[in-house]
Amino acid sequence: MKYLGYSILLIFFVSLFDACNNPLEDVTIKIKDALTESAINLTYRNAVSSDTTMIPKSIKFAFLGEDAEGIVSSVGNKKINISREGLLGIAIAPDYTKRPANIKVVAQLEGYLTDINLVTVQAKTNINRTIRMFKINNLPSGMSVDLKNIDDKDIASQGVNLTTNGQKEKVSLVSNSGINVLDKSGTVLTGKLELLLSHFENKAREFVPSNYTVYQAIGLDNKILPPFEFQSYGFFSIKIINDKFEEANNLSKPCSVNIEINEDSYHTNGTRLKEGESIPFWVYANNTWKMLANPVLKRNTNGKLSISTSISSLSYYALGEMFPVCEKGPVLVVNSANKGLDIYHYSRLIEKSSGKSVGDVYLSLNNGARYSLAGRRKNTVYLQVFNFNNQYGGDLTKPIFQTEAFDLCEEKTIPVNIATPSPQPINVELIIECAKGQVVNNATVPAKVDIQFQPKGASDWRDLMTLTRNQLKGSTYKLKYGSTYSIRASPNPAQGWLFYKRDTLINTTNYRFYIENKDYCK
């Protein structure tokens, strides 16, 4: 793998009209070109975006599984580190040909819950994921946990009690003596065990898999149910791992669970939950929700409205009724003069009968763009589109287009006719300068250069575009003419950002990166 040597005196960012001072003068940085096939990019973020530690530091990693021996860094060696931005760049080595390749990435950080991510690489495809890390003393609102460490002999001999501390809801789990913890093959897990009981109120349901519109769920009769949304009364999960990061799937015999319900909960028909009623209970298994026997609401020893049941599978569970949704629905089709827009405009669904908002959509306004509205609750609505986009906002006071009313369960095409012209694009180009008599040697140019931007006053970096050795120019609508951004670029973000320019005023529509490097010329 060839090193890409850059002298910062010879690389600079400049507009056609306004040259900038070099921010890294007299510094030479070398960054290796990244592998572009079977790459795995895992970005770690704090699950609470307002936390002062948004990007967790000092994470320790372990790579396990049948194909862990094939893991290399993003540049093909065995020196693997997480970047300052929380990006772990790894790959399946080019000479490791087994496919699919299955690995387990374990991330540990003091004060956070251990994260175990299963990754499967098919063919030469790349994988990009953002992984949320949960700080135990600052969990997302509506989430509570109980974490215990115990020896496998102790759980078999004396049992365990786990209880979460939700404000209006909580779950308690009790395992009696004589229980063994089993992996998916039925083998007993041994060693030190970490037991994690998590409870998710409705406002924390985003951390539960397939928790909104549910497809292919299985009923009590083992038949597939029509799609629905959960009218949720709470979710919880139970996870057990040992000190070898082996994960448990089942218990050798059931343990008891008591789930306290928020007293202010309502049925889908609008009536309040009360004692003596049964409510659906679900387990998440084989990537789908399956209904279990419906428990009856009672008052527990604390006088709280609750259900008591037993479980033996270690997974996610839900208490929730089915709110039917439209299995099929209309498709929005945009008619406009726009093409190449990489921004999305805010659109609002308005209930015809009440005039209230019942949903929103960020819609591409490129000509021919399509968006399905299937999977929403039955209703008659109309759509309003606003000149407000996902990058720099706009006007939410008056829609630029409004449809006629339509049925959300009807299969039909809804035209979205946009006459408003698109904003001014900003053109970005990477120019390689060679000495007189030389030309660019395309084979040595970086395979790709990732470019990101950060609006002034914002804390997050956003992807702008990726240029490649075969396409060294591009256009974007993400940057607003007249606004100020920080901009950075790198052929391999996992190894660092080669170029960084703070507070760049976008006062022209053409910006160019100039690189002068003899390695790229012949």
Image (spheres, rainbow, N blue to C red):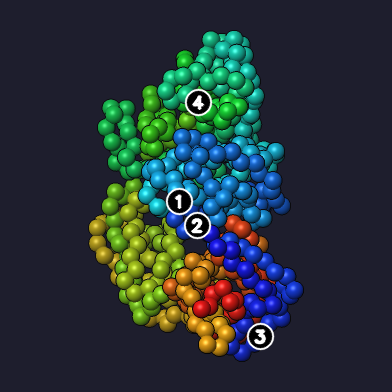
Looking at this rendering, what residue extends furthest in the left direction? 411
Mark 4 closeness class: few <14, some 14–19, many ≥20 residues within 10 Å: many
Which quarter of the figure has residue 482?
Answer: bottom right
Q: Which mark is residue 94?
A: 1
Q: Which mark is residue 361?
A: none
Query: Which callout, 3 or 1, points at the residue further toward the start of the chain?
Result: 3
Q: Position of residue 373 (x, y in %)?
A: 34, 57
Kind of residue indicated by mark 1 = Pro
The residue singled out by tag 3 in the image is 19
The residue singled out by tag 4 in the image is 248
Kind of residue indicated by mark 4 = Ala
In this orientation, which residue lies closer to the viewer: 517 or 138?
A: 517
Query: Which callout, 1 or 2, points at the residue further toward the start of the chain?
Result: 2
Res. 458 visible in picture: no
The residue singled out by tag 2 in the image is 35
Q: Position of residue 291 (x, y in %)?
A: 37, 30
